[in-house]
Amino acid sequence: MDSTAHTLDLSTRYRNRPLVSVELGGVVHRVPEGVTVLEAMWYAGIPVVRGAGCLGGACGACTTTYRAPGGMAPKTGLGCQIEVREGMSITLYPVDPPHKPTYRMAELDDPAEALFTIYPETRRCTLCDACTTVCPQDIPVRATVRQMMNRQFDLVAPAFDECVNCNLCAMVCEVGIAPNLLGLYARKAVARAMPAPPELTRRMRQIADGEWDGAWRELLALSGEALVARCVELRGAA
Ligand code: SF4
Ligand code: SF4
Ligand code: FES
């Protein structure tokens, strides 16, 4: 992504807003009041590529920690959703994906039992609640880990409906649990026991029959710029 283009675009868009001073990664910048953390970074000319995705609070790519003036404890959230205010100190988290064991849910005899082989660290939960505190989606994460141990996948699966996989809960866990991956596991286990939606079955058959091969090849052949234009076009049509 071209950060220069963003800088120019944002300068024009926010030219009538008052400027505030915020610390971005340890350096003070003057940016328009009320823009999001990501917009503030682009405005200041700081390239953000891997920490930016949907810009709509859905992909979890932009995990951020920030502190407001007045000495309050640092908070965490999504950089595309947090609006900057005078005196804030902001740092984007580095991309830090957890270890992801591989398994095929469809081939597990007993998903509840297999959980402790695939994710043995689940038993080490200390109930510290750090994962709940850090979650920007207000998911009761600690409670879901306990429910996983109690084989209550039917309770865990809907609790993760709003999970954006930002990974913050995994980053703060002192015993190496990735609760978001456990949530995904529970959702797969619950889905496995249900009939597949007919639309999904139809589309999977189309993919297997090669009906979408042409469209896929067309996408892969696009340049980066053309791909961005296609995304913008699709977002506009949605
Ligand atoms: S459960 Fe974890 S990965 Fe999901 S939104 Fe909350 S902190 Fe992010
Ligand atoms: S942060 Fe880890 S140890 Fe603490 S409650 Fe959450 S899963 Fe358990
Ligand atoms: S960029 Fe997707 S959640 Fe912020």
Image: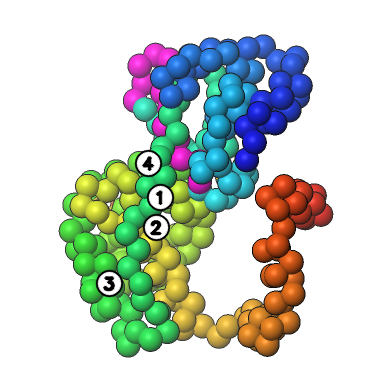
**Residue 57 pos. (x, y %):** 58, 45
**Residue 203 pos. (x, y %):** 68, 80
For the residues bearing labels 2 and 1, Cβ distance under 8 angstroms: yes
Q: Distance between the residues labelled 1 and 4?
A: 10 Å
Q: Is residue 110 above or below residue 124?
A: below
Q: Distance between the residues labelled 4 and 3?
A: 25 Å
Kind of residue sitting beneath label 4 = Val
Q: Decide whether the magenta segment is chiefly helix, strand or loop.
A: loop
**Would residue 148 be visible to someone looking at this image?**
yes
State which region is magenta. Answer: 61-73
Q: Nearer the N terminus, badge 1 or badge 4?
A: 4
Kind of residue sitting beneath label 3 = Ile
Q: Distance between the residues labelled 2 and 4?
A: 12 Å
Q: Nearer the N terminus, badge 4 or badge 3?
A: 3
Mark 2 close to ligand 1, CB under 8 Å: yes
Labels 2, 3: front one: 3
Q: Mark 1 points at which residue?
A: 167
Q: Mark 3 points at which residue?
A: 118
Which residue shows up at 70% across the image and 62% down it? 221
- The quarter of the image holding the N terminus is top right
Mark 3 close to ligand 2, CB under 8 Å: no
Q: Name the residue under label 2.
A: 180
